[in-house]
Image (cartoon, coloured by chain):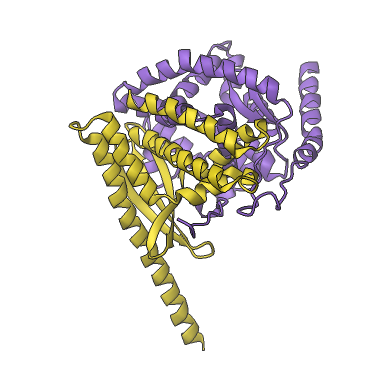
Amino acid sequence: MKAKKNILILISIFLFSFPLWSLESDKINTNSEDFETSNYEDEIYDPLESVNRIIFSFNNAADQIILEPISKGYRKLPSPIQTGIGNFLNNLKMPLVVINQLLQGQGGNAVETSGRFIINSTAGLLGLIDVAEKVGLEQKQEDFGQTLATWGVGDGFYIVLPIFGPSNVRDASGMILTSITDPINAYAVKEGEGWIIPVKTASNAINDRSKIIDEVNALRNNSLDYYAAVRSSYYQNRKAAILNNNDNTSMPLPLISIEFE
Amino acid sequence: MKLLFKIIFFIFLTSSQLYASEASKWLKTEIDFILEAYSNANISNEKRFLIIENTVNYNFAGKGIAKFISGKAWKHASKETKEKYIKFFKKHLALNVASIMQGYVNQEYNLIDSKYDSKNKVSLVDMIISTNSSNITITWRVKQSKERFYIIDLLVADISLVVTKRSEFNSMLKNVNYSLDIFSELLNKQNEESYKLLIN
């Protein structure tokens, strides 16, 4: 009971301090006189940059030594096995997706995702086969970071988490909320099968990493400042996820002059 | 009056769609050209990159992108520095595009969707690349000028190459007090390293 109370207090502190962090992140302004071509914000609020860069170097080394080789091996598995594992892991995320869709007021999407979960868990053999996709129930992803953003919570400052990688205060808090509220995690702990949680996390990491091997290598091999490139990529990716971008027409457009080509 | 409005609206919609579809057709030819260069086993890696570099330089709005990405460093740079920077940047852009496309050589792709953003006069062409277990979407932003098309950006899974490069360059430029001249040398060194990785 006391532990529950402590967790609630911690969450409250997290949530109430968001506006303060958001104010800090709003301090970054670009000067329109600096460049004529755009009103882009170049700088991401990163007060812990020196520490973040150290953690980033560690993560990058760990990725090259452990995660990337395992992901490459995983990608050599027969396609149906990879698809099955991916579907199974995605299906486990669905209960939390439904909760977040409800918290964001997306009733229709929540019904659709619930339908997906029920169909795939039964007719789809515990989620191994994505039957729901075939009947027109599209997969959508929502997490607590996105929910907090929808509620008007700002990004906060940028942080690089050991092992977990790029994040910001809001999304890292969302991640903590996810691990606390995930019904699969709760069930595993209740049944004394806590080992399921790290296995699930590692499997998700390998599955996700295997899908972007070429893209990460292209970015890493061609970056003058790989840290800054990843930081920018993270923010763009999250922005698109928060906006629920189905097409890129709503993404900010760089104002590029082609008059002197 | 209402009918006239409807006719104008219809013409506008049709012409926007035609414009986007024209951009999509043009883009397919250029992408095929790059992918064919990769699948041709009879040419050396150096020659292959040269073909891709020429294609990228011809089809991307390289100068405009270079200017945008350099941000505030552009304003105070001399003409010679700008020219040197543009030259290195174009090579950098070609290396980036070549590196991205290299991963998609043996994979199926489809240009599935093209939209015309009439506000910004830009066509957005979606390219779906199907891998073994998943799909990835690349969106090409294409603009028309002087009766031809130019690629102004490409987005891989919602991440813009141009925006990422601008953020990355800004971080480096800050360290050299926004001197485009010093930065160009760093860019050249990075190009040499990237080239070695791509060729070998």
Q: What residue is drawn where x is 58% and y is 27%?
A: A227
Name the foreground residue: B125 vs A188.
Answer: B125
| Residue B118 horizontal/vertical position (percent) | 50, 65
Q: What residue is drawn where x is 28% and y is 29%?
A: B45
Chain B image colour: yellow
Name the foreground residue: A192 vs B53.
Answer: B53
> Is A113 displayed left or right of A129 in the figure?
right
| Residue A61 horizontal/vertical position (percent) | 52, 15
Q: Which quadrant of the structure image shows residue B124?
A: bottom left
Q: What residue is drawn where x is 46% and y is 42%?
A: B87
| Residue B42 horizontal/vertical position (percent) | 17, 32
| Residue A242 horizontal/vertical position (percent) | 60, 43
Q: What residue is drawn where x is 32% and y is 40%?
A: B52
Quadrant (top left, top right, bottom left, bottom right) of the N terminus of chain A: top right
The image shows residue B119, relative to residue A98, as above or below, that is below
Q: Which quadrant of the structure image shows residue A145?
A: top right
> Is A52 displayed left or right of A216 in the figure?
right
